[in-house]
Amino acid sequence: MVSPREREVLELLSNGYVTKEIASTLFLSNHTVNDHRKALMHKLDSKNVAQMIRKGFEFNLLNASI
């Protein structure tokens, strides 16, 4: 369903990173990060990043570490 790289992008998004920071952290271009974000939005049937992150928790793609 979700690729390992998409999962990394989702994790960084859930930690408040913006596209430029994600690209730098994962050694990707901004365009590639946006492609992963679009794929995640589609795969998780989300309308925005907040909903995508919520679904990431619901589908156990993200771990709550409080």
Image (cartoon, rainbow, N blue to C red):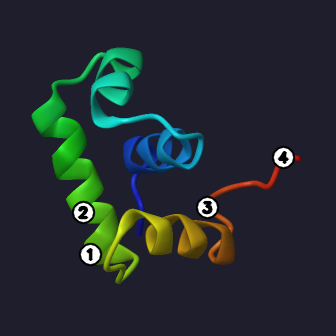
Instruction: Residue 65: give its label.
Output: 4
Check disc 2 and report the residue beneath it: 39
Observer-side mark, 3 or 4, equals 4
**Which amino acid does the dot numbered 3 rest on?**
Leu
Image-based side of 44 in relation to 60, left or right = left
Q: Position of residue 25 (x, y in %)?
A: 41, 18
Answer yes or no: do the residues labelled 1 and 2 have beta carbons within 8 Å? Answer: yes
Ranked by sequence position, the earlier of labels 2 and 3 is 2
Image-based side of 29 in relation to 42, left or right = left
Q: Position of residue 37 (x, y in %)?
A: 28, 54
Check disc 3 and report the residue beneath it: 61
Image-based side of 60 in relation to 56, left or right = right
**Which amino acid does the dot numbered 4 rest on?**
Ser
Circle count: 4
Quarter location, residue 55: bottom right
Ranked by sequence position, the earlier of labels 1 and 3 is 1
Q: Residue at x 42, y 42 (%)?
A: 9
Check disc 1 and report the residue beneath it: 42
Quarter location, residue 38: bottom left
Q: Residue at x 29, y 35 (%)?
A: 19
**Which amino acid does the dot numbered 1 rest on?**
His
